[in-house]
Every structure is written in structure tokens, then in C-alpha cells.
Image (cartoon, grey):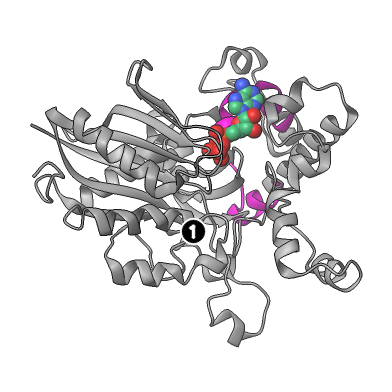
């Protein structure tokens, strides 16, 4: 019987899951899928590695299945599906591990309680990340669970990169720049030697451009600076998040527009970014095909801010050997990659337009002083690796037991 690891990435109204078998130590996906619309129109789908649907279920509109109900369906599905496998544990993506969790950790009730402390630092993510952990601790207490943090990869940054210029007593309370998307950056750092030794060992900026977007400066594969800060609202504009914001704007919104904290939270996390600027959509595909000038304005602002951050991160590194595009937009939007590379010509990036249009991994010309790549990320695989490493090959109890 092959060992298997389930990976869960839970959001506010959906979760993604994957089941990795680890026969030879190389995690490979057996089945993956998602449960969406958990509080509106629930829908569950699971696909095998060839993309064929192996399980699908829809609930009536208005059904409030919730995370727990969807998790019950997933567990039942895995039980059926797992006849050939022995589930040795579940790995979870958890957005915030604070200053404390510098690496993945096996979770129990006391660790969950400690992780609840970070809910105010990631109000839109952390509660949902923790919810399936709590549900599984109740339902299957013998099943080992591992939390893998988006912040851990950045904990080795120099102190100066993590500090805000605030009074020491506030910094000492943990008000620091944490950085996020660490599992994605860690995955890219892990595979980068397969693409370029120079990029892997040198000064490289990785651009994780998805619904959430950030950039990370890496020296020899280690994070030295990130565009994201105390929360995942900092840095680049994103699908619905505003990114960098003068703190004076928040005071203005409170004093002059009478907004309270929750209204501002909604504004900066859910109503801003590409959606807010365009007034049309948060989705890059929709904006790229739109003729509306506001869609163009939103994309222009996104690209402008990427360019500014690239200069800043190159300064943090003291030079630049490579840039790497990843995540939904970075991996797929050729037009955006081309514009970002052209804007970065001053840094030594020369794009190979044909290679970029073909979708090659290396998209810089042979003469380019700075290498450029588009590399798919795989946060789930990183979580499966960490979970397996922490649990070892032969621990835990299968829910079949
Ligand atoms: P998440 O942060 O939710 O994991 P993803 O990494 O899946 O997000 O990225 C989602 C973003 O990627 C969306 O803005 C989507 O429009 C964009 N995207 C996906 N495919 C393409 C494409 N072919 N061209 C342009 N943008 C794309």
C-alpha cells in the first residue's frame, strides 16, 4: 500500500485539495479538486492526474454546506478513493505563522490556539485556513496534520528588511514585515537549479503574480526582501487588494469619510486593486480582453507598480541576475511579461519576444545581462513535501484503520 498525503488550501468560501502519493519519495498527484460556493451554491469536483472528473456533486442554491460539510464529503470521497493508499497525514496551507513559526509544524489543539493569535494579521485567510484543521482534529484526532506557513520562507531576512520605522515597543509586539507566498517562493527556489545555476545561486527577483501578488528578492535561493509586509495587503496591487497605501489615507478615510475599521478592511482587501481601479473585474483575463479604458488603467497601474518594486528589490539585492514570473498571471499572461521585461530594460533585461510568445521557460535573449524565466509554481507539492518530511514515511493512522 502506498503512503499518501492530502493537501488542503482553504479560503473563505472554497477549498482546494490534492492527494499526493509518495511511493518513491517524489510526491505525485493522484487526485485533486475543489469545493466552491460553500455558503451559496456548493459544488465539489475531483479530477485524476489526467484531468478526468472522478467525482462531482452540486448542492441546491442556497445550501449552506460550509467548510465542515464539504470536508465531510471530501473525507468520504477519499475513504472510497483511498483503497490503494494509506493516508499518513494532511498538510495545510496556513497564511500566517508570525515570528514564531519559521518552519512547518505538526498541529494539535494548543498550536491551533497559538495560530488563532494571527487572525487579526490575516483576517481574510487565517480563520479559513484553521477551520479544516479544527474540524479534522475533532473528527479524526489520530490523523496527523501539519501546518505550512506562507511566512516561514521570509523569516531569515535581515532585520532591516523586516522592520517598520516604528517605536521599538511596537516592533517588539511583532509589528514586522513578514512577507507571504513563501511556499510558492520556496518551490521556485527548489526547482530553479534545473533552469539556471546562475539564477539559483545569484540575485533573483521572483514575481508571484496571481489573485494575490507579491515579489521576493532572493540571494542564492534565500529570501532577503519581499513586497508584502505585516499583512497580505501590502506591496503590489492585487485582484481586489490595494497594496501599498500611505497610512495617511487610512486616517483620512476614518476622519473625513467616517469609515470604521471593518469598512476600511473591506475596502483594502475586497474592493480595491484591479477590481477597484477598473470597476470591472479582478480577473486579469477579463481585463486583458476588455476595451474599456478603465481596464487598461488597472493593468497599467499593476505593471507600473511591478516596475517600481523591481527596482526596489534589485536595490535590496545590490544587483540583479534573474527575474522569474510565476502564478496565474505570471505563468500565463505573455503580454504582461513582455511589458514588465521591457520596462526593466534599464536593469539589463532583454526579452526574447518569440520565446515569450511560445511559452518557453527562458524568455530572455542570449545577450540579456539579466535572465528572465516563466516557471509554474506548485505550492501544494511543497506542502506535501514538508508534511512528508515532518511525519516520516511510516507514521500516523489511516482513517480506514
Ligand atoms: P490565486 O492567487 O487565487 O491562486 P492564481 O495564481 O490562480 O490565483 O491567478 C489567478 C489570476 O491569473 C487571475 O487574475 C487570472 O485572470 C490570471 N490568469 C490565469 N490565466 C491567465 C491567462 N491565460 N492570461 C492572463 N491571466 C491569466
Relative depth, front residue between 207 and 114: 114
Q: Residues within 10 Å of mark 1 (few under 14, many from 20)?
A: many
269 sits to left or right of 94: right
393 sits to left or right of 370: left
- Where is 346 relative to 392, above or below? above
Q: Is residue 45 magenta?
A: no
What residue do we see at 80% from left, 64% from top?
246
Classified by dominant secondary structure, the portion drawn in magenta counts as helix
Question: Which residue range is magenta in the image?
Answer: 311-340
Q: Which residue is mark 1?
A: 126
Give the image location of residue 323, x and y in percent.
58, 37
Specify whether residue 364 is in view: no
Give the image location of residue 332, x and y in percent.
59, 24
Give the image location of residue 172, x and y in percent.
54, 82
Ligand 1: quadrant of the figure:
top right
Q: Residue furthest bottom?
A: 169
Position of the C terminus, as image quadrant, is top left
Specify whether residue 70 is in view: yes
Give the image location of residue 210, x and y in percent.
59, 37
What residue do we see at 45% from left, 43% from top?
65
385 sits to left or right of 356: left
Relative depth, front residue between 355 and 330: 330
- Where is 240 relative to 363, above or below? below
What residue do we see at 34% from left, 37% from top?
381
Amino acid at each position: 500500500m502506498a503512503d499518501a498525503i492530502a493537501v488542503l488550501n482553504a479560503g473563505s468560501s472554497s477549498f482546494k485539495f490534492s492527494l499526493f502519493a509518495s511511493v518513491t519519495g517524489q510526491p505525485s498527484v493522484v487526485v485533486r479538486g475543489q469545493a466552491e460556493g460553500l455558503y451559496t451554491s456548493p459544488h465539489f469536483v475531483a479530477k485524476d492526474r489526467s484531468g478526468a472528473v472522478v467525482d462531482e456533486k452540486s448542492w441546491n442554491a442556497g445550501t449552506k454546506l460550509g467548510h465542515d460539510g464539504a470536508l465531510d464529503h471530501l473525507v468520504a470521497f477519499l475513504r472510497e478513493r483511498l483503497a490503494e493508499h494509506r493516508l499518513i497525514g494532511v498538510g495545510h496551507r496556513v497564511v500566517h505563522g508570525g515570528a514564531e513559526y519559521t518552519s512547518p509544524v505538526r498541529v494539535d489543539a494548543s498550536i491551533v490556539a497559538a495560530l488563532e493569535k494571527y487572525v487579526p494579521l490575516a483576517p481574510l485567510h487565517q480563520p479559513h485556513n484553521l477551520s479544516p484543521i479544527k474540524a479534522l482534529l475533532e473528527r479524526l484526532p489520530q490523523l496527523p496534520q501539519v501546518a505550512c506557513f506562507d511566512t516561514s520562507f521570509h523569516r531569515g531576512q535581515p532585520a532591516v528588511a523586516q522592520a517598520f520605522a516604528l517605536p521599538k515597543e511596537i516592533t517588539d509586539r511583532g509589528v514586522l514585515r513578514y512577507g507571504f507566498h513563501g511556499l510558492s517562493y520556496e518551490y521556485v527556489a527548489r526547482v530553479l537549479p534545473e533552469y539556471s545555476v546562475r539564477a539559483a545561486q545569484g540575485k533573483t527577483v521572483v514575481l508571484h503574480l496571481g489573485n494575490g501578488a507579491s515579489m521576493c528578492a532572493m540571494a542564492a535561493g534565500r529570501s532577503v526582501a519581499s513586497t508584502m509586509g505585516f499583512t497580505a495587503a501590502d506591496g503590489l496591487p492585487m485582484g481586489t487588494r490595494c497594496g501599498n497605501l500611505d497610512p495617511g489615507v487610512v486616517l483620512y478615510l476614518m476622519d473625513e469619510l467616517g469609515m470604521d475599521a471593518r469598512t476600511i478592511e473591506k475596502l483594502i482587501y475586497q474592493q480595491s486593486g484591479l477590481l477597484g481601479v477598473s470597476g470591472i473585474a479582478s480577473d486579469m483575463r477579463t481585463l486583458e480582453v476588455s476595451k474599456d479604458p478603465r481596464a487598461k488603467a488597472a493593468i497599467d497601474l499593476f505593471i507600473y507598480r511591478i516596475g517600481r518594486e523591481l527596482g526596489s528589490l534589485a536595490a535590496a539585492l545590490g544587483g540583479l541576475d534573474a527575474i522569474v514570473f510565476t502564478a496565474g498571471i505570471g505563468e500565463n499572461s505573455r503580454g504582461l511579461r513582455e511589458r514588465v521585461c521591457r520596462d526593466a530594460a534599464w536593469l539589463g533585461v532583454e526579452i526574447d519576444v518569440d520565446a515569450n510568445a511560445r511559452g518557453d521557460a527562458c524568455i530572455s535573449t542570449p545577450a540579456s545581462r539579466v535572465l528572465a524565466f516563466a516557471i509554474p509554481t506548485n505550492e501544494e507539492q511543497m506542502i506535501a513535501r514538508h508534511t512528508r518530511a515532518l511525519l516520516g514515511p511510516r507514521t500516523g493512522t489511516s482513517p480506514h484503520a
